[in-house]
Image (cartoon, rainbow, N blue to C red):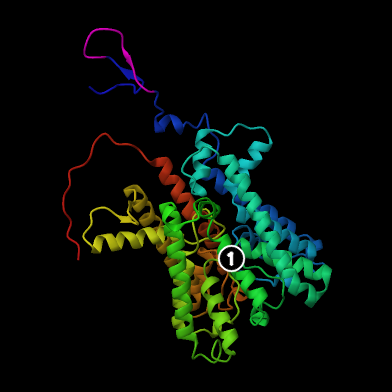
Amino acid sequence: MRSGSGLGHRSLTSGPPARGPWKLSLEQAQSRRQFLLSPLALVCVFVLLILLGALLLRLPLCTVDGGRTTFLDALFTATSAVCVTGLVVVDTGTHWTWFGQFVVLALIQVGGFGFMTSTTLLLRLFGRRIGLRERLLVGETIAVSSPGGLIRTIRNMALLTLVVEGVGALVLLVRFGQMDGMPRGLWTALFQSVSAFNNAGFDIFGDFVSLINLRGDAVVVITTALLLIVGGLSYVVLADIYRQRRFIWLALDSKLVLVTTGVLLFGAMLVYALFEGSNPATLASMPLRERLLSAAFQATTPRTAGFTTVNMSDMTDYSLLFTMFLMFVGGAAGSTAGGIKVNTFGLLAATVVSTLRGRTQVSAYGRAFNTEHVHRALTVAVLALMFVSVTTLLLAVTEEADILSLAFEAVSAFGTVGLSTGITPGLTDAGRLIVIVTMFVGRLGPLYIALALVQRQRVRDFRYPVEPVRIG
C-alpha cells in the first residue's frame, strides 16, 4: 500500500499507525519562502558586479592619460575580468594605471573564486543562516554532492587560492624582480599569478604581446602553465588527490577529470608540434628548447587561460580549429576555468564508448554514471554549440573579418579563454556588445543550465510507453 503523506502509513492490521522515517520532498526543499539563492539571483549579482567594475574603470584615476574610458570599453573590460576571459579592447599594461589594474585584478579574483561560493561566505559573515537549498546549489557549482561541511570546504578553497597564488607570485618574483626591480616586479608577479590561477589571461606586459617576449624563460612559462593547470582542476579534485594519494582510490569524478585533462594536454602538445613544427611563423623558427616549451604551453593555455607564447594569427588553420575544440571543452567543473567542462566532455566520451561497445549502462573505471547526469551533459554541450554557432553568425553580420577568425573569437569568448587572432580591438560597437553577452553567457550559461536542471528535477510516479525511433 502506498503512503499518502510520506510521513507514515497505517498497518493492514489493527492498531496504532506505524511511524516511518521522516522524508523531505523535493518540493519542500525548493520552497522559495525558506531559501534565498536561485540561478536568477546569481545572474543579477554578476550583472551588478560587472556594472560596478565598469563604473570604477571609467574613473580618470584608472587611465594613464587621465581621461575617461568609454563606457563600452570599460564594460567590455569589466565583463572580461569578472568572467575571467582575458579578451581586451584596450591594452591592460599601457592603458590602465596601477589603480585601474588593481580594479581589474580584484574583478578577476572575485569572478574566479565564483559568485556562489563568495555569496555563501558573505552570508555566513553577516550572520545569515544558510539553508538546505543554498547549500545544495553552492555544492552543485563546486561539485560537492553533500551539503554537510560546505562552509569548511569553501574556507579551504579560499585558503588554497591564496596559498597557490602566493607561491606562484614568489616564484615569478625571481624573474620579474630581476627584470623590473622590486616595486614593479612584485606587482607584475602578483598580477600574473592571480590571473594565471584564475585562468583569466590578463597580463600587464603591454602592447598585447602576452608571453611572446618571454617564451624562452622556462621559469615564467612553466610557472604560469602550472598555475593554469592547478586552477583548472578544481579544489574538489585536488582535495581528493590529497586524501587518497592513489589513483585507484579516487572518486569517479576525479578520475574522469584527471584522465581527460591528461589526454587533452598530451594530445594537444603532439598536435601543435605536428601542425606548427613546420610553420616558420610560429614553432619552426624557434630553437628546439623554445619549440618544446611553446608546444607544451600552447597545449595548456586553450583550457580557458588566454596567455600565449606565439602570435595566434600566424598559426595554421588546422591549429586554430583544434584550439577552438580545446577552448570549447575548457577545464573542470567547480574550477576557475570555463567551457562546457572536461567532466561534461569526459562523460559524453564515456557515453560514446559504452554505446559502441553495446552497453546499456554508461560506465568507466568499474562505476556507472547516473543517467540524469548523462542527460545534463548532453543538454549543456548541445545548447553551448548552438549558442556559439549563433554568435558566430551574428559576428559575421557585424564584422568584416574572415569566418574562421570570427568563429575563433566566439568560441574564445564563450569558453572564457581570451585567445584571439587579433580582431578584438577592432570590433565594432555591435561586435563588442555581442562578445560581452557571449562572455557573460559562457561564464554563467553552463552553470545556470546545471542549476536549473537540478531545480526542475522531479521524481515521477509513472513512465511513458516506449516507442522506437530510427537512427542512422
Residue 249 position in % (x across, y down): 43, 52
Residue for badge 1: 228
Q: From where the camera sits, is residue 117 visible?
A: yes
Q: For the image shown, how many numbered marks are present on the structure? A: 1
Residue 425 locus on image (x, y percent)? 63, 74
Classified by dominant secondary structure, the portion drawn in magenta counts as loop
* Image quadrant containing the C terminus: bottom left
On screen, 144 above or below 282?
Answer: above
Query: Is the N terminus in the top left, top right, bottom left or bottom right quadrant?
Result: top left
Q: Quadrant of residue 165?
A: bottom right
Q: Residue furthest top?
A: 15
Taking depth in this image into account, of 277 and 330 the one nearest to the observer is: 277
| Between 147 and 398, the one nearer to me in the picture | 147
Start-end of magenta stretch:
11-21
Mark 1 closeness class: few <14, some 14–19, many ≥20 residues within 10 Å? many
Q: Residue furthest front?
A: 246
* Residue closest to the eye, 449 or 356: 356
| Residue 409 on the magenta segment | no
Q: Is residue 407 visible?
A: no
Q: Residue at x 67, y 32 (%)?
A: 127
Magenta span contains residue 14 = yes
Q: Quadrant of residue 260?
A: bottom left
**Residue drawn at 59 percent across, 51 percent down:** 114
Tell me where residue 410 appears, x and y as whole percent: 50, 69
Residue 225 relative to residue 469: left or right: right
In-image side of 145 versus 202 (left or right): left
Identify the element where label 1 is drawn. helix
Q: Position of residue 343 (x, y in %)?
A: 43, 58
Q: Pick whichever, 117 or 178, lies toward us.
A: 178
Residue 313 drawn above or below residue 378 = below
Give the residue at x 59% y 72%. Answer: 428
For the residue marked with disc 1, what is the amino acid? Leu
